[in-house]
Amino acid sequence: MRYKLSISMLVLLLTLRVAFAQNGKYQFSQLNRSNGLSHNQVNCIYKDSEGFMWFGTASGLNRYDGYSFKIFKHDANNKKSLNDDFVSGIFEGPGKKLWVSTRGGYCFYDPETEQFDSDMSVMTRSLKVPGYPNVSKIIRGGKGEFWLVCPDSGLYRHNEINKTTRRYYHHRSGASLYSNFISDITLDATGNVWVVYRNGIVEMFDIKQNKITYHTEVFNKAVNNKDAYYAITVDKDNDLWFYTPGFYANAYYYSPSSRAFRPIANEPSGLKLKSNIISNIIQADDGLIWIATDHGGINLLDKKTFTFTYLLNREDDAKSLSQNSVINLYRDDSGIMWAGTFKEGVSYYHKNIIRFPLYRHFASDPKSLGFEDANKFVEDKNGNIWIGTNGGGLIYFNRETGSFRQYKYEPGNANSLSNDIIVSLCIDHDQKLWIGTYFGGLDCFDGKTFTHYKHNDKIAGSLADNRVMSIFEDSSHKLWIGTFAAGLQIFDREKKKFSPPFKQTDIRCLYVSALFEDRKGNIWVGGYFGIDVILKNTGRFIHYSINKDDPNSLISNTINCINQDKHGLIWIATRYGLSILNPETNKFTSLTKRNGLPDNAILQILEDSKGRMWFSTANGLSRVTLIAQKAPYAFRFENFDETDGLQGREFNDQAGLKTRKGELIFGGGHGFNIFDPLAIHANTNKPKLTFTDFLLYNKSIKANEEVNGHVVLSKAISATRELTLTHSENVFTIEFAALNFFNPNKVKHQYMLEGFDKDWIDADNATRKATYTNLDGGDYTFKVRAVSQEGRWDPDYITLKIKVLPRSGNRQ
């Protein structure tokens, strides 16, 4: 059916709003020359069917396995090398051959030989497509099909299973293509081919009916029938996005189902791209439309509201987009979004790579967090967060606006904070904020006025110590104050007096670091000398401390935090490990690094809504799931570090909070992370294992390379499944990798040479190599397997059969 552009198509039914980026949500990982990329100008990106990432740069073709690059360049003395170093396009065609477009023309790469051939007639003849003009684009369809565009000759459909090729072109039949002058093609979710011609007309080729079934001139009319090399993207709703790559021109959105039409560039009414020079438009897994621009970064368009979010470079943020001149975008089959830039390499994003949104201070952004070193957090009735810092005073975080307001000590101003070092916070039932400072005493803030309470030797009932380390309001609204060196006090709000509630023999520690009320109303007090529990019903005390002769005692007397889980177990964070008390048996179970924790210094404990316990430590975060709920307990550990987006590996003591919405906040010296724990999923992307190199006496061996008068590898090592070595060639190294781009450094490898090794051996993840020397003659099988970030061994493995000939034997 043919549609005509009407006034109704131009009517925008959606409200225009513009949203600016919060770069804390979109945090990128980076690849550039410092990682081994051959050049920082990245012209094209592609992921092949074997799982390798390919980057075409201004100085060579780069194959990336998640750990390192293998670089292919032009060699004037090697006819089988890349024909030119400036790589502008990469496609995978039949037979897993890569078509590589360079300034020297096309060549194709054979992964089995790792060699290039510039004689494209060998390839075009086999596919039955014209040798000239060159194929401008190849896309893979389903069931072994490939669609090839010959710009002046039409569209070709090749099936590599039955080796057939069919041409579709313009002719007088009504089912023909509109024109042979095809500018771009793309596939929709059902495998149909959308074709845009050089004059802007768009058609859809239905693969089941084997003919054109849809035609629109909406874009043709918008561009006034002007010829150009247009590009088209079809999103998962079968809506169309039309643009001219690399030119200062307009771009358009059109919905064939609703006939809604609108420009998305040069828009006077408020919907603004940061730049109207567009290089790519693609859709991410979450439905947002990513628009890559020149000097305008990446513009994210939400179709539901037609609002923009801008992802831009910040010079002091290593996790922002590396440069605002984005040459291309690529979405791989795992949903990772790759952005190639003009001068700063590759930035790539997926919500499961850098999983923890980070708030920190940026000198380039006056609206960012004003001071990074975050000690304490509390939430007010509106869901906003008060942050106590280690030297930057008090900060109010408005969650709705994303803004920060800072309160600091002002000399001579009685209505200011008493000290900028805040070590404890509490919001009471009247929504008053209580602020414990280090050497500034206790402050109370009602939103307008700061009231100060300090120690005074001459006043009975004053604060015992100006270092207030913990503040807690219990269920009866009693306010407990824990100090650095003067023990525990209770503050009488009516009388404005502080008093010690118990004798020193009852509450033993003068340093009170932790206060907690359990479900029975008992008050737990922790410090340097273990834990004192004040029993609500009897007023009696229970003391817990370390007993080296009792393996079921507290693991350490230095207490950082106390919490209770949904099962009633008491979790106690100490400087030397974690202790879990079962109140029914009065016995502790303790966990340390030996059990799977990232560090023994446990600084804060929070429970998420699924009952999993989260710990901040001196070496990252840990999520611990209680598998067996009765002794002997069983646990599963998942550990996270700065590569996951954490503010750093070290966190501050008790710098954590669970919000009413169930979010968790953890803070440290470089800001704080706030996240939904239910959104932190295990990485389910199963890595594909491959062999990446084979070395004899530390020399890498290529396919068909002669060594000692014979060829060791008839194919590249990645395509080799067995090989034979002479006895003198028995010093060899095999390199391997799990092709995973979700924090690959967290994927561990194990290997074993059957016939020599008795068990699996842990590989050094930095090198992923296994070396063997002086093997006896015989048959061996080398195996490699990978373990996921969550610690479960994948049962799959790859193998390489190796025959070592005996000393006196001849090659067979």
Image (cartoon, rainbow, N blue to C red):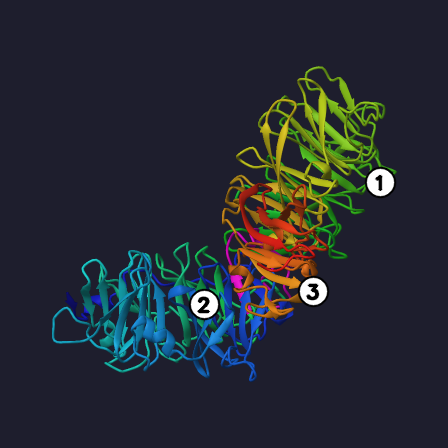
**Span highlighted in magenta in the image:** 346-370
Which residue matches tag 1? 456
Query: In x, y percent, where is residue 794?
Result: 55, 43
At label 1, the amino acid type is: Asn
Magenta span: predominant SS is: loop
Q: Is residue 496 visible?
A: no
Q: Gap between marks 1 and 2, in whole Å? A: 65 Å
- Marks 3 and 1, how far apart at CA: 74 Å
List the residue tagged with mark 3: 698
User: Is residue 362 highlighted in magenta?
Assistant: yes
Q: Nearer the viewer, residue 246 or 62?
A: 62
Q: What secondary structure is marked by label 2?
A: strand
Image quadrant occupied by the N terminus: bottom left
Residue at x-position 85% and y-position 26%: 504
The residue that label 2 is drawn on is: 329
Picture quadrant where residue 203 is located? bottom left
Instruction: Tell me, yes or no, whether the highlighted magenta stretch contains residue 215.
Output: no
Instruction: Specify the amino acid type for callout 3.
Output: Asn
- Which residue lies most toward the right here? 457
Disc nearer the start of the sequence (2/3): 2
Q: Which numbered disc, 1 or 2, marks the residue that appears first in the sequence?
A: 2
